[in-house]
Amino acid sequence: MRSEIKENSRGDPLDKFAPLLLMQGVTKHFPGVLANDNVTLEVQAGEVHALLGENGAGKTTLMNILYGLYQPDAGKIILQGNPVNIRSPRDSIALGIGMVHQHFKLIYRHTVTENVALGLKDLPFWFPTRVVEKELREMSERYNFPVEPRAPLWQLSVGEQQRVEILKTLYRGANILILDEPTSVLTPQESENLFKALYKIKEEGKAVIFITHKLEEVMKIADRVTVMRKGRVVKTLPVAEADKNSLSQMMVGRKVSFQFSKKAVPPKDKEEMLVVKDLYSLSDRNYTALKGVSFTVQSGEILGIAGVSGNGQRELVEVITGLRSAQKGKVMIRGQDLTNYSARRVEKTGVAHIPEDRLRMGIVPEMSVSNNLILRHHYRPPFAEGPFLKIRQIHSFANQVIEEYDILTPSLRTPAKLLSGGNIQKLILARELSSKPHLIVAAHPTYGLDIAATEQIRYLLLQQREGGAAILLVSGDLEEIMALSDRIAVMFEGEIIGLLSASEANPESLGLMMAGEHQEVLRS
């Protein structure tokens, strides 16, 4: 196991008074975009340093420069007083910088030990993984990260896979650990365990750069925070001198509301829009992903589906929207049995779908913004007449919804892939909601978005609810689930193991259910 931070990469003693990391005057251009504008970031040994900013603020670019994925156009990087030239991730790792990406870089057919051992030098020729396994067990106990070194990756939960990524990075001797949205796939209990490990890591004199959109986490775990906006650093300050409102205002440039009021919908106005009964379906790997799932969603109601990613939520959404076959059970939409009907037939019944993967399933990346906005209805009036598209009507509609949904785009002809994540999501919502749907199936609608885009999208969903739409909201963000939902169902290993009203829910009980503890079904 690599030693604690006591010397730099050349073996010189560390100067405890110098910052562990100084990125000074870093500038990075991309065609038509100034991603980092004279950015200076200082990180001390033994601290958790939060990095905040909207999508497009320059956080990811800055960290990609530190990790060697990009080269800066100007500026310098200084590690413990020594200027360094980081040309690749290999250089970064050699200098004691490790990064745990939002999407893990693991090989699922290999064991935990094999994943950690890949690429390591100086291992014995015979039985090289024995040494790694022994040290992994020691590290696992040291950081309270229980993981079985001999287990294949595919057998582990998402939270356990993240532990492997962190242990792999620490095993390689990381003194600076970059974590990109680390709690987005964790239950509340797993997040707490992660925070305890981070306390241990910083006690050893290492530094953690913590990228997150969750201001509560910043206030809880970070020592200092740097806020970025439009490629520049707005301010760096101790967390003790900040609060959620001041941080959000620095990020966005205006006040952001964290409170959402839900208007009551009279019971007499409600009708069952979606009935799912005893639903079974297979996953892409041909195992049973849904096991007898049943629930209803009424008009004017948001039913939140909580759970750690990978417990059947994706398969549930795809069966309801006509993208996956059910092996057994029924999907009733507005009184019609639409089980195993096509996606187009489901859409014609008044169903909107906000998919989990906005780039792969929500848009055609190379297609223009205007054409993406009519994808659902491109084959019928007013956008088409026979086999011919009516360009004037398409552009008129596109201009109208771009203004209504505040989609920031250079032009109607801009390829959708060039928009920011928040604007791509607003494009999808504009297309799906403009047809006034009766049922909205929204899968992780604010995942990876900054607080301004998140605020707008949550308001849009609440407006649809108040207009009488039924909404099935699938999200791993408990704050979002509890803020928006009327009732909450928790999925674990393909089953609904708890169903309760939002007023009766709390993060602790939901977290236990997300980890597999069955609860009494309180609401049907």
Image (cartoon, rainbow, N blue to C red):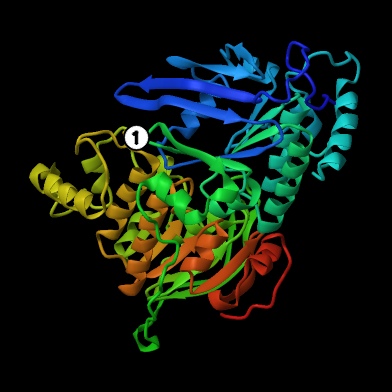
Position above or below: 371 against 116:
below
Judge the density around disc 1: few (<14), some (14-19), many (≥20) Cα neighbours within 10 Å: some
Q: Is residue 385 above or below residue 31?
A: below
Residue at image location 78% in from the left, 38% down from the top: 203
**Image spot of residue 387 (x, y percent):** 14, 44
What quarter of the picture does the C terminus occupy? bottom right
Query: In front: 325, or 365?
Result: 365
Residue 305 lies left or right of residue 130; in this view the side is left
Foreground pick, 386 / 42 = 42
Quarter of the rendering occupied by the N terminus: top right
**Residue located farthest toward the front when viewing the structure as drawn:** 17
Query: Mark 1: which amino acid?
Result: Lys
Residue 22, above or below 428: above
Q: Secondary structure at mark 1?
A: helix
State the residue position of label 1.
417
Q: Position of residue 509 (x, y in %)?
A: 68, 69
Quarter of the image for residue 161 reads top right
**Observer able to see residue 283:** no
Q: Position of residue 154 (x, y in %)?
A: 71, 41
Q: Which residue sits at x=42%, y=74%?
A: 301
Residue found 71% across the figure and 27% down from its top: 175
Could you tell me which residue is drawn at 35 percent across and 44 percent down?
424
Query: Tag count in the figure?
Result: 1
Give the image location of residue 428, x and y in percent: 33, 50
Residue 121 visible in the displayed image: yes
